[in-house]
Structure formats: structure tokens, C-alpha cells
Amino acid sequence: MILKNLTRRNNTGQLVNYLFKQEKDNKPKPILKHNLKSRTTKGWTKELDKNFELRMHRRIDNIRLHHTIISFSNKDKKQINQDLLKDITKKYIELRGKENQYLVSTHHDKEHIHLHIVMSAHKYLTGESNRISRQEFKDLKLALDEYQKEKYPELINSLPSHGKSQKLQLTDPELKLQDREGILSQKQELLETVQTVYSRSKSLDNFLSELKSEGYNSYSRGGKVYGVEDESGRHYRFKTLGFDLNKLEELNRQAQEEARQLQELASLRDTKNQEREQDNDGFERGIEEDIKDGNEHPESDDSEEEAGIQDEDDLDSEYAEDN
């Protein structure tokens, strides 16, 4: 089988209607739907758009839907039935993630049988993006290929042929336009996001962290940050996009120097506080010693006074005896 992923940023209804354009009785019968309750194209469109409005990160021209096409050779059509297509779809959803919304249909032409899988770009009811990298999509494809070989070895004309070109040729004019517009809008969205993040970043680390929070990962070559990867896995060099990372690296050095100076000030402040506490402790000990010494003298005076009183009593006694 061959997989191709397209993206859609608007007009959900157009894509949903495209999925069921071959339905002769105008009654859409999806191969499978997941996290969708409606039974009509209008209902599914409304549910998909409503879930899109819950997205956590709002950027210009967000991806709204993923449109994945799985292609089988028409030479295997005798072995391919609705149950097989439904099972392949379930396996794809298991690998891609069950947290999203899915709507699946099938198209038949002279050369191929196509599974059309429309998936919400954000998890159901949470607004969290479910983006995967190009490598992760490749791993998903390999896992699906292995599943097909093990469970459906009779699909000999649809077996994967690794190492050879497996690019799906889009013949439908609507899909060609969607693919071309998707590539252009992805680059424009990436450029605007990078510009916004770059303008507010105070260091290279801050820039890369902010980009990641926006859903874009950077990539490196030779141990040095080189560019950014878009949602389809396509790479763009920062230099080609017009962004000088040297300026951010300089800001990064300045930030590190400021942090070092702040650390030194904090250490100096702690040292002075400790010295002040030690001085206070010594002062308090001196007061305690003075108080202790002061308490010894009054005790001595009291003893003398008591002794003096005793002497007067003795005198009185002696005086009485004389009389």
C-alpha cells in the first residue's frame, strides 16, 4: 500500500463532500467514523469545525484536518472488501491515535482502490494538537505495511516495495490543488510563526523553546542548530528564511553573563548576611555575659547588707545584756 498525507486549513464541508462524491444514492456510507455522532455530511462538517474551534494554540492559518490516502492496487480488488478496508482503517487509527475524530470513505478507479481518511488535527474535545514528525509518519507506514503482510498476504500487488519510489500520483484535479495549496500555506504559516517568535525571543534557547511550544521542531547539522521542520516534516534553513541565529546566540551569551553576575551578587549578599548574623550573635553573647556579671555584684551586696543587719542584731543583743 502507498500512503500520502495532505492537509486542509479551511472549507471542511468541501472535503467531507469529496469523500462521498461517488455515492450514487447520495446517502453517505462511511467505511468507519470515530468520535463523530452525526449521520450526514452536514453533521460531520459541523462536528469537525466545532472541535477545531477548541484548539489550544491559535495561529494564522492553522491546520484544520489531515487527509490521508491509502492506496491499494486494483489488481487485488477480488481480495479487497469492506471488512478488509475497515480493518486496515482501524489499525491506522490505532497507530495514529484514537483521541482524534476520523471519517473514512473509499474511492475506486481503474488503477487503484483508495481509502480516504479525514482526521481532525486536534484531539477530540481537548484542543491539543496531534502532530507527528515525518519520521514518525514513516514509522507508522512501516508498521502498517507489516500488518498488511502478516494478515493479508494475498494482496500481492499491494505489498510494500521498500527502496523503490512509492509516491502516490494524484490524478484528481481537486487533490492536486489541495496538495499544492497545502505546501504553500504550510511555508507561509511557518514563516509568520518563526518571525513572531524570533522578534520576542531573548536568547537562542528561548527561541527554540517557543518554537517547540508552537508545534515546530528545530533540526541540527554538525552539532549546530540549522533550521526548522514544518508540520509535514519538510525542512527549512533559518538562513534561507532570513533569520540570523548569531544575534540570538549573542543575546544568549549576554543572558548567561547577566545570570552569572546575578549569581555573584546573590552569593555576596548571602556572605554579608552571614557576617551580619555572626556579628549579631557576638553582640548578643556580650550582652548576656554583661548581664551575668551584673547579677553577681548585687548578690554580693545583698550578702553584705544581710551581714550588716546581722551585726546590728548582735549589737542590740549585746546592748541588752549590758543593761
Image (cartoon, rainbow, N blue to C red):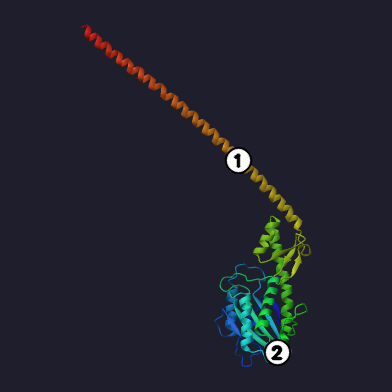
Q: Earlier in the sequence, mark 1 or mark 2?
A: 2
- Residue 200 seen in this snapshot: no
Q: Secondary structure at mark 2?
A: helix
Tell me what residue is drawn at x 33 percent, y 16 percent: 307
Whether 250 is drawn above or below 216: the answer is: above
Q: Is 109 or 302 nearer to us in this picture? A: 302
Residue receiving disc 2: 76
The part of the image, by quadrant, that contains residue 297 is top left
Whether 178 is drawn above or below 285: the answer is: below
Marks 1,2: beta carbons within 8 A: no
The part of the image, by quadrant, that contains residue 269 is top right
Q: Secondary structure at mark 1?
A: helix
Residue receiving disc 1: 269
Q: Residue furthest top?
A: 322
Mark whose residue sits in front, 1 or 2: 2
Task: Tell me the amino acid under the disc marked 2.
Answer: Asp
- Badge 1: residue crowd in 10 Å (few <14, some 14–19, many ≥20): few
Q: Position of residue 116 (x, y in %)?
A: 66, 83
Residue 63 in the figure: left or right of residue 279: right
Q: Is 164 or 129 nearer to us in this picture? A: 164
Quadrant in the picture for the C terminus: top left
Q: CA distance from mark 1 to mark 2?
A: 78 Å
Q: Position of residue 207 (x, y in %)?
A: 69, 59
